Each structure stands twice: as structure tokens, then as C-alpha cells.
């Protein structure tokens, strides 16, 4: 029934994640044999959260950055919304840190620069993420980070939302102004969460942690945390500048991009703009698709440049992914 259209193009596999009201299944795009993650949302269960999902879908169609998990196709049926998303074979950054106990300053810096770039890009578009944590940072096949918003908490900046802990699980990464239910700026709250993230990368545990949620809130509002002896002075200073209880005293994204600790070993500040350009299409992929679909190259290019996130957009993006991985992109012998 509603899944049949999807199942013509994707072979569904196991569920790899369950969020508030979303389920994510691993799937294979039949035509290109590429793996994808399909987020399935039941509109009947979404209730008054439906507008938030439509906001996220609209955001995903705009977000186009090398460190953000990209939308491949969007499909709406009577009762479901399907988001076909880039599959990240490396899994969650959370598991990567747990496995390695904690990361070196060099590796933490490499990851943190990618996080700054992705969050800065989202902020420049007027969005805030609001749920930055290692579970929402995935690793692709080149160990690059991809930001996702699994808990469906992405909202336009400035929104007041005291329901955070309900839709986004543990508030260990949540800023003081957020846990105290005050009105807050999403971009400032994201900086606090990035401070908690950097601490988690360098230490392997959280700065504020307590199984009793009341004690956890008190620790966050107090802003006191341990400084393990292995932390360098520069990393302690950087973390301190992000974990400022008063949001107005917190370092900004712009200052982060060229902070001495962030710049160490690199000769360029972090760039928050995208390296992708939607006006440019890969001609090999367009040609392959036009031959396969029996339409002219110009017609195929025109259709793809509309970025409708339909089955053609999906085939194009997954062919491009294959090409980037050095795999053949001929569609005829894949079917
Ligand atoms: C190999 O073992 C493993 C093990 C685990 C995972 C994987 N791979 C793997 N790849 C891709 C996904 C995925 C991508 C995007 C979205 C999403 O919700 N996008 C929407 C989105 O990103 N909005 C947005 C982004 C930025 C700003 C604003 C809005 C959801 C899921 C995945 O999910 C599994 C969950 C499991 C629970 N923790 C989180 C990930 N898993 C692989």
C-alpha cells in the first residue's frame, strides 16, 4: 500500500534507530545498489508536531554542506512522510569515543573543526540545531563527520521551547538558560552544547552528569565541572569560553572559527560556507540518467536542476556518490 511505491525503488532492511516519533531503517537503492537511511514518520502519530517535521523537511531541502547528512529524497503519502537520507557507515561519534576511551587533541581538533563548520553553516541560514550531542554526529566512510538532527528538534532560531527534555532525551548537553526554561537564543545554546561536545571528545565523559535530573540541572546552572590533568591550558581556556552560564559571555561562532586552539596545526580558519554548488551538475551522471530514462541530456539536466528530491534526484545523488567512491555509474547493468 503506502510503502509499495517506496519498495519499488528501495530494498528495506533492519531498523537502525528509533527517535521520538521517527523510525530509521537501513535500505538499498535498487538502481544504484547504494545504501541509504530512510526516516519514516507516521503523520497520525505526529499530531501537532507535524509542522515541526515539515519545517525540518524544508530545512533539509536547503541544507547542503559537506558535514551535514544530506536529504536524498522526500516522499509523502496519505499517512507517512519518508525522508531518504545519506547513510553513514561509520555509525555514531558517541560509539567511536566510547571505543577509544577519549580522543587526542589532534583528532578532537579535526572533528571539532567539522562541527564548527556545520553548526556555523546552519546558524548562517537562520536555524539553530538545539540537540548537538555525539549521538547526532555520524561518521561517513572517510571518517568525516555528518551532523544529523535525529530528535526532530531543529527549529528556526529564537524559538522558546521548554519541552526540550521531552523530545530530545538527556539534557546533559543542554544550556543553563534552556534547562531553566527561560527564553533563549538557539545559536547561543548551540555554543554551550558544542562546549560539552568538545569536553566529551577530549575527556571521554561529560562535564555535567548525574542520574538524578534535579542534581544534573543544578550542576549545569552552576557551571562547575572537573578539569582533568591531561587537558592542555589552551583547551581548558576554549572549553571555559563555551561553558559560560551567562549566554552573553559565551564565545561566538565567528570567534570559534579562528580561535588559537582551533587554528593550531592549521593555516586557515574554519569556513562555515558550503563546498557544494547546486547549480553545478556532474555531466557523466546526467548523461547516464538521460540515456537510461530515454530523454535528452538537456531535458534531464533541466529536471534535475529543479531539485525536486524525487526519484530522479535520488538516482542522481546516489550515482554521484558511487562516482566519488570510484565505482562504475552505468545504470544498465545494475538492474
Ligand atoms: C554502521 O552502524 C551504524 C550505526 C548507527 C547509524 C549508522 N548510520 C546511519 N546513517 C544515517 C542515519 C540518519 C541520518 C539522518 C537522519 C535525520 O534525521 N536527518 C534529518 C536531519 O539531519 N535534520 C537536520 C540536520 C541538521 C540541521 C537541521 C536538521 C537520521 C538518521 C542514521 O540514523 C540512525 C540513528 C540511530 C540513533 N542515533 C542517531 C542515528 N544512521 C550506522
Image (cartoon, grey):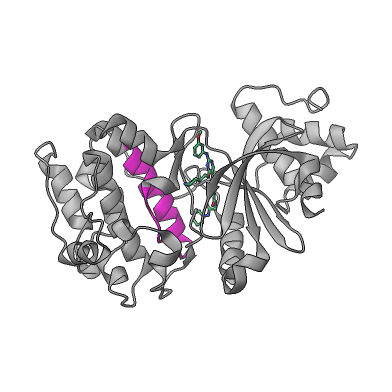
Query: Up-down: is 134 above or below 168?
Result: above
Which residue is pictured at 62% across the width and 33% down the height?
A: 321
Identity of the residue furthest to the front in this view: 212
Kindly indicate the quadrant of the structure image that contains residue 102: top left
**What span is in magenta?**
110-133
Residue 315 placed where, x, y %? 73, 39
- Side (left or right) of 60 relative to 101: right
Query: Up-down: is 178 above or below 170?
Result: below
**Residue 50 visible in the shown view:** no
Query: Residue 163: within the magenta?
Result: no
Query: Residue 129: within the magenta?
Result: yes
Query: Up-down: is 297 above or below 158?
Result: above
Count of all numbered marks drawn on residues in the image: 0
Camera-nearest residue between 326 and 45? 45
Residue 285 placed where, x, y %? 73, 33
- Side (left or right) of 228 relative to 201: left
- Side (left or right) of 14 relative to 6: left
Camera-nearest residue between 81 and 330? 81
Quadrant location of the C terminus? Answer: top right
Which residue is pictured at 61% across the width and 72% down the height?
A: 47
- Side (left or right) of 156 relative to 199: right
Which residue is pictured at 27% across the width and 52% down the height?
A: 196
Kindly indicate the quadrant of the structure image that contains residue 53: bottom right
Residue 277 placed where, x, y %? 59, 46
Chief secondary structure of the magenta portion: helix
Residue 200 placed where, x, y %? 26, 44
Query: Up-down: is 25 above or below 150?
Result: above
**Residue 185 visible in the shown view:** yes
Amino acid at each position: 500500500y503506502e510503502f509499495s511505491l517506496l519498495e519499488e525503488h528501495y530494498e528495506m532492511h533492519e531498523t537502525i534507530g528509533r527517535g521520538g516519533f521517527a523510525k530509521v531503517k537501513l535500505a538499498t537503492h535498487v538502481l544504484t545498489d547504494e545504501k541509504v537511511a530512510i526516516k519514516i514518520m507516521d503523520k497520525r502519530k505526529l499530531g501537532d508536531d507535524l509542522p515541526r517535521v515539515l519545517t525540518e523537511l524544508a530545512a533539509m531541502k536547503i541544507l547542503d554542506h559537506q558535514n551535514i547528512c544530506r536529504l536524498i529524497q522526500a516522499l509523502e503519502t496519505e499517512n507517512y512522510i519518508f525522508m531518504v537520507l545519506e547513510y553513514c557507515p561509520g555509525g555514531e561519534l558517541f560509539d567511536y569515543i566510547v571505543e577509544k576511551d577519549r580522543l587526542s587533541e589532534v583528532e578532537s581538533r579535526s572533528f571539532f573543526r567539522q562541527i564548527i563548520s556545520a553548526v556555523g553553516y546552519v546558524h548562517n541560514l537562520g536555524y539553530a540545531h538545539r540537540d548537538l550531542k555525539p549521538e547526532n554526529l555520524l561518521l561517513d566512510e572517510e571518517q568525516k563527520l555528518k551532523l544529523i538532527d535525529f530528535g526532530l528538534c531543529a527549529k528556526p532560531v529564537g524559538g522558546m521551547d521548554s519541552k526540550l527534555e521531552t523530545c530530545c532525551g538527556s539534557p546533559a548537553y543542554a544550556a543553563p538558560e534552556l534547562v531553566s526554561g527561560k527564553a533563549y537564543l538557539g545559536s547561543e545554546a548551540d555554543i554551550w552544547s558544542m562546549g560539552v561536545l568538545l569536553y566529551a571528545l577530549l575527556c571521554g565523559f561529560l562535564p555535567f552528569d548525574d542520574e538524578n535530573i534535579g542534581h544534573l540541572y543544578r550542576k549545569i546552572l552552576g557551571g562547575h565541572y572537573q578539569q582533568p590533568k591531561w587537558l592542555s591550558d589552551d583547551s581548558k581556556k576554549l572549553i571555559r569560553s563555551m561553558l559560560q552560564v551567562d549566554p552573553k559571555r559565551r564565545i561566538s561562532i565567528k570567534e570559534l572559527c579562528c580561535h588559537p586552539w582551533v587554528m593550531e596545526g592549521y593555516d586557515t580558519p574554519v569556513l562555515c560556507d558550503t563546498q557544494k554548488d547546486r547549480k553545478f551538475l556532474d555531466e557523466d551522471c546526467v548523461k547516464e540518467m538521460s540515456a537510461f530514462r530515454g530523454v535528452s541530456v538537456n531535458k534531464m539536466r533541466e529536471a534535475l536542476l529543479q531539485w525536486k528530491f524525487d526519484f530522479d534526484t535520488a538516482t542522481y545523488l546516489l550515482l554521484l556518490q558511487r562516482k566519488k567512491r570510484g565505482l562504475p555509474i552505468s545504470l544498465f547493468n545494475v538492474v
